[in-house]
Image (spheres, rainbow, N blue to C red):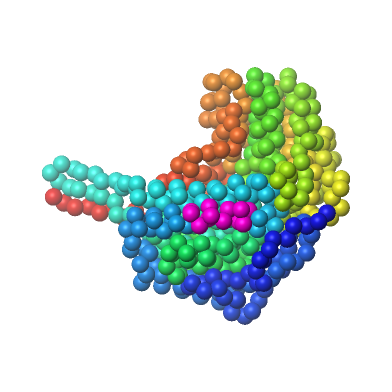
Amino acid sequence: MTRHIPEGLPDRIRHFIDGEFVDSVGGETFDVLDPVSNETYVQAAAGQKADIDRAVAAARRAFTEGSWPRMLPRERSRVLHRIADGVEAQDARLAELETFDTGLPITQALGQARRAAENFRFFADLIVAQADDTYKVPGRQVNYVNRKPIGVAGLITPWNTPFMLESWKLAPALATGNTVVLKPAEFTPLSASLWADIFREAGLPDGVFNLVNGLGEEAGDALVKHPDVPLISFTGESRTGQIIFGNAAPFLKGLSMELGGKSPAVVFADADLDAAVDATIFGVFSLNGERCTAGSRILVERSIYDEFVEKYAAQAKRVVVGDPHDPKTEVGALVHPEHYEKVMSYVEIGKAEGRLVAGGGRPEGFPTGNYVAPTVFADVPKDARIFQEEIFGPVVAITPFDSDAEALELANGVKYGLAAYIWTNDLKRAHNFAQAVEAGMVWLNSNNVRDLRTPFGGVKASGLGHEGGYRSIDFYTDQQAVHITL
Ligand code: NAD
């Protein structure tokens, strides 16, 4: 297969500190691979403690001495809108680079680039509409809330849809007047390096945005343990979240954690079956299955179980696996050979735990690259590893249930609680099930689409705190109460 290599790739991926692209102080680098050839296409600067120290010092200076935290929300909002314009103006280029680096299908990468622009527009608008509480005790007191940016925010992001997920943290952190140090995922540092020029052209002052590439255990760890970084917003695996939680504890840092998931899609017999099949196919195979909110466990009422499994397997076999740059491709290459090995190991485990009805290995015609055929296991018991553990690839487990109570027990019977999808035409059942299911976000008869004003976050091992809309503003600001006696 011929591989699409974007023109104009950088000769080295560098940090961006205090308005300049720089290498690591000690010159350390790491290899960056593309997932179609698994060849190293560039070296990236591997940030160490010294680099994080430099970046935090720049961000701290910009916070204590610079104009950004002191600007009117309206002025910051204008910069954020220009950032959104900059992202939109190069959405095709962004998608091309993201697809090359991550293996995501190009049409989906383009959608993610546009969402990144939308995140900036949304927080640009929200910050000027921000109203804070005021309470009056007649004749005695006026109380009001003084909302202030907190300082240097440490932003640590994963490799799935990297540019969009970075925007989800950068936009509210900057809108509220903080300065930032971003540590993107080491598997996929390419698109993050575009932020620097986009921000500069939009007029963001030097030192407000700093980027340090590198490994989690080195650069990420140093950022979490830096005493001048009072906030850490993290998206990644639950296990990493636990480590960060422990490392941040001595400093009592503000933490926002968007973690892993093993979300159920529950299909009742009275559901619109075709719509449920379409949505649950999309729910686990879009973004290569590398999606935190993937509906990776499908629970189906017994009376429609056989029909559902048959339709689902047939449709999974029609999902187009291909070159990520081909617009016809629906599932591309998984991000990295290490992740590919992990997903393939679950495919093998699944063969002993369930009944394989689609996929089950490397698709035909793809001898190299991190390709996995959309894989469906039926009759998966609740104690199976493929039912309990996050696989984060195009692999789904289907399990039958006999009653609402059993469906709920299965849905809640994992350590995660990020999303749940419910398919039924019974209004009462839909709302009662939504109320009882342990998930931060529920979709009723719906695909995974959401309004940016709604809270985003998980319960149990899927997260801590909420981002989205005003919750993001709350996370990135202090709310000081001021009391005046009349
Ligand atoms: P990961 O936890 O391995 O890495 C995430 C980031 O943390 C990377 O930048 C990494 O370098 C850094 N990191 C690793 N160890 C660290 C440490 N000790 N200290 C500081 N930083 C460290 O996760 P991943 O494999 O990149 O991403 C996939 C995971 O992210 C999945 O579990 C997925 O469900 C989750 N995710 C969650 C959401 C959500 O919103 N809930 C969204 C996307 C992805």
Q: Which residue is drawn at 68% across and 23% down?
A: 273
Q: Where is residue 171 in the image (x, y as percent from the top left)?
A: 47, 55
Residue for point 34% across, 54% down = 74
Residues in magenta? 84-95
- Dominant secondary structure, magenta: helix
Residue at (63, 62) in percent of width and height: 190
**Does residue 89 show up magenta in the picture?**
yes
As drawn, the residue found furthest toward the bottom would be 26
- Tell me if residue 279 is in the magenta stretch: no
Q: Which residue corresponds to the image point at 73% horizontal and 48% vertical from the top-left?
A: 326
All told, the count of numbered labels is 0
Question: Which quadrant of the figure has residue 295?
Answer: top right
Q: Note whether residue 254 is visible.
A: no
- The x and y percentages for residue 271 are 64, 22
Is residue 292 visible in the rendered image? The answer is yes
Q: At which x and y percent is residue 115?
A: 54, 48
Asked if 418 appears above or below 422 in the picture, the reply is below
In percent of width and height, residue 66 lies at: 37, 70
The quadrant in which residue 72 appears is: bottom left
- Tell me if 422 is positioned left or right of 373 in this view: left
